[in-house]
Amino acid sequence: MTATTSSSAASPVRLEIATLWRLSWPMLVGQLATVGMGVADVAMTGHVSAEELAAVSLGTSVWSIVLVTVMGTMMAINTVVAHEIGAARYDQIPHSVRQSMWKGLLVGLVACLFANLCTLLFDHVGLAQHVADRAALFLHVISVGMPAFACYRALYGYTTSINQTKPIMWIAIFGLVFNVVSNWLLVYGNWGFPRLGAVGCAVSTAVGMWLMLGAMIVWIKYAPAYRMTYPFTGWEGPDWKEIGAMLRLGLPIGVTYFAEVSAFGLIGLLVARFGVVAVSSHQVALNFASLVFMVPLSFSIGMMTRVGQAMGEGNPVRARFVGWVGVGTSVAFGALSAIFIALFRWQIAAVYTSDPAVQAACANLLLLAALFQLSDATQVATASAIRGYQVTRPPMIIQLVAFWGISLPLGCILGLAPQWFPWTPDAPLETTGFWIGLVVALTVAAVLLTWSFEKLARQRIREGAKDELMHT
């Protein structure tokens, strides 16, 4: 009797995990392929020279901040469409997608301008002038792809929320293959192409983003799954009221992503004063940690869709259930990734660079990356669950406090050991000190977001029960 009851109780969890996996695994492959472009840029440039690797590392520090902020800002369409699917308002979806595309164009152009303005900082981070110039040129070139990326993320959110995730996988794989091949031609100057080094990576990535947008539009046009909600039936100008509503929903997500990634990126700029080895090892460790992070992120995006659809159906009890299953799945992967990184950190460093000094510094940072895997998986999952309820400000506030109120100040104290501060280490811990600050920040964020998700879920259940009583 007990065994039967236990099996019966566990079956809804297993069923939800299976459903979440079917929704998320194509996104996982797509996310890994997308991040793989950055991995290819860093790894392939690392075998040219330490200076070229430093230029890509510095440029990518800024580029990653802009890219992920745009990705978060565009994520509003995910929860909007998921709620419309749950409520069976299919006729509203094409309008929402078209307006999200206009929003993407606006956000992409602003991000492109911002990325170019950031190059003015490169003359003041302590690197050799020729490395700073190469990093600036890298950013100028790669920023041309930003409008395409923002519009692609609008279509990404749309197709994810109608449970069509395989296009994301295949298009991202296409983008990765294009990026690696074009890097091989342009970074190293093979087959008579110019040897561009770091700039070759920027050209490959920018062109690849436009090709991925085109591929997504073509897929949506011809795949039968999109016929009921096909968004490109005719011309529709911008509806600024609708775009404003999406910005109010999406900007806090963008700021949330910015808070975390900018902390990592700003650390990249701060550690540049410690030399080429420090900035290169930081970027390599961060690049691999970002690659691993795509797994819980993919589960979280799938779970956000599931929570949004449940809330669109008016079922807050199910929303809480699918949310916690998604969180548990992400945390389980976080535990596995922590073990893997700790055991194979030297081999990981060797894949990126052949420089022994960079390898040694990178292996030390990867040990700290292993420490924050559990908290990183927890915070991204709980934040996505909260967004599934179309609530975006609490995660923003928590991330800002954690990363800008705790991580960066603590990192500066430990890494720089300023003499004016009364409690500093005897000698600066340099890059290691900044990464200790990141470990603490991710832990704080995980705890606060877990508490916020449970509080919100219970509140929505009580509100749903009250509404049901009023209608009986």
Image (cartoon, rainbow, N blue to C red):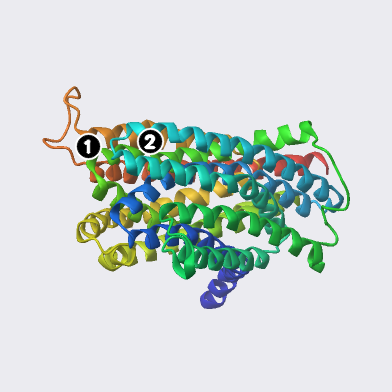
Nearer the observer, 277 or 99: 277
Query: Residue 214 at x, y = what percent?
Result: 70, 58
Report the side of 183 relative to 57 (left or right). right
| Residue 5 percent coordinates (x, y) | 56, 73
How many neighbours does mark 2 have within 10 angstroms: few (below 14), some (14-19), or many (20 or more)? many
Q: Nearer the viewer, residue 59 or 21?
A: 59
The label shown at residue 122 is 2
Q: Would you identify the image quadrant in which residue 238 lies? A: top right
Q: Position of residue 163 (x, y in %)?
A: 70, 62
Farthest residue toward the front? 192
Q: Is residue 223 left or right of residue 246?
A: right
Q: Does 239 appear above or below 100? A: above
Name which residue lies at 57% across and 39% down: 112
Q: Residue at x 45, y 54 (%)?
A: 377
The answer to whether residue 360 is visible is: yes
Q: Residue flagged by tag 2: what amino acid is it? A: Phe
> Is 22 placed left or right of 159 in the picture?
left
Relative height, residue 218 to residue 101 (above, below): below
Q: Which mark is residue 181?
A: none
Instruction: Answer with left or right where residue 143 lies relative to residue 412.
Output: right
Q: Which residue is mark 1?
A: 414
Q: Closest to the observer: 237 or 472?
A: 237
Residue sitting at the far left:
426
Q: What is the crowding at mark 1: few (fewer than 14 residues within 10 Å), some, or many (at least 20)?
A: many
Query: What is the secondary structure assignment of the residue under circle 2?
Result: helix
Which element is circle 1 on?
Answer: helix
